[in-house]
Amino acid sequence: MKKPLINNELLGIFYMILCQFSFATNDAMVKFIYQNFDEIFVLNQVIFIRGIFALFFIGIFLYFKNLLNFKIIFSSRQLSIRGVFEAFAAICFFIGVATLPFGMVYVLLSLAPIFMTAFGALFLNEKVRWKRWTAVILGFIGIIIVINPKELEFGYFFIFPLLSAILLSFRDMYTKNIKGNFHSLQIAFITCLVVTIFFGFLSPPRPSSPRLSRTFANAHDRVIYP
């Protein structure tokens, strides 16, 4: 049997690196847009428009894989609830991206695997042996070292990336208990649809509010740079 030119594991690693690069690029563009508009409500519009494009491309992949079956996709309430977790995690994350230094947001978001391990033991009765707990504790210590709390000015906006990490952990726990043989693209499609609808309701056309922008900017400066 002829061996494949590219190992599946290497291909998976490549896709994960490409995925993380795309996420980081997207988040950088969101922060750039927020800094230019100086309006917190623009985040809702950005995520809504992004969701439309994502639905289009995921739908194309589903169509060519003969998986674009709306009856199956919309048959599970659990997938919709998963999308709600994703929507609230997204709004918390992007508020963090808009109001905190970029690297700090990603460091705080990296707590999600640690939360996931702890929640799996607490809520799913998973057996977490001492080696995994050691890895969790060392990971947390590593995050503390990277953050270097002595050089940080803590404020209320720090809570948003932490909330996002917690919500993502609950989302993944909920995903594990979803019943039904759904393709990953179908799960991504319904999740993206729920997120897009959620932010569509939060982003109706509205006139710019310079007073609100100045108020939010001043509050941000007082909290982050007292």
Image (cartoon, helix red, strand yellow):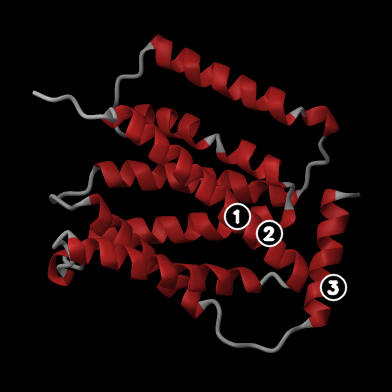
Which residue is identified by label 1? 27
Counting from the top left corner in percent of width and height, residue 20 is at 50, 43
Looking at the rendered structure, the kind of residue marked 2 is: Lys
Quarter of the N terminus within the rendering:
top left
In the picture, measured across the screen, residue 74 lies left or right of residue 216, that is: left
Along the viewing direction, whichever of 205 and 173 lies nearer the viewer: 205
Looking at the rendered structure, the kind of residue marked 1 is: Asp
Residue, x 83% and y 28% (percent of image)?
Answer: 150
> Where 118 sits versus 81, above or below?
above
Between the residue at mark 2 and the residue at mark 1, the CA separation in whole angstroms equals: 6 Å
Counting from the top left corner in percent of width and height, residue 205 is at 59, 87
Along the viewing direction, whichever of 54 and 73 lies nearer the viewer: 54
In the picture, measured across the screen, residue 167 lies left or right of residue 99, that is: left
Q: Residues within 10 Å of mark 1 (few under 14, many from 20)?
A: some
Counting from the top left corner in percent of width and height, residue 154 is at 79, 42
Along the viewing direction, whichever of 12 and 155 lies nearer the viewer: 12
Between the residue at mark 2 and the residue at mark 3, the CA separation in whole angstroms equals: 17 Å
Q: Nearer the viewer, mark 3 or mark 1?
A: 1
Between the residue at mark 3 and the residue at mark 1, the CA separation in whole angstroms equals: 23 Å
Q: Are marks 2 and 3 in contact (CB under 8 Å)?
A: no
Residue, x 13% and y 25% (percent of image)?
Answer: 2
Which residue is identified by label 2? 31
Along the viewing direction, whichever of 143 and 27 lies nearer the viewer: 27
Q: Earlier in the sequence, mark 2 or mark 3?
A: 2
Which residue is identified by label 3? 214
> Which residue, as the protein is rendered here, is positioned at the far top?
130
- SS at mark 1 in the image: helix
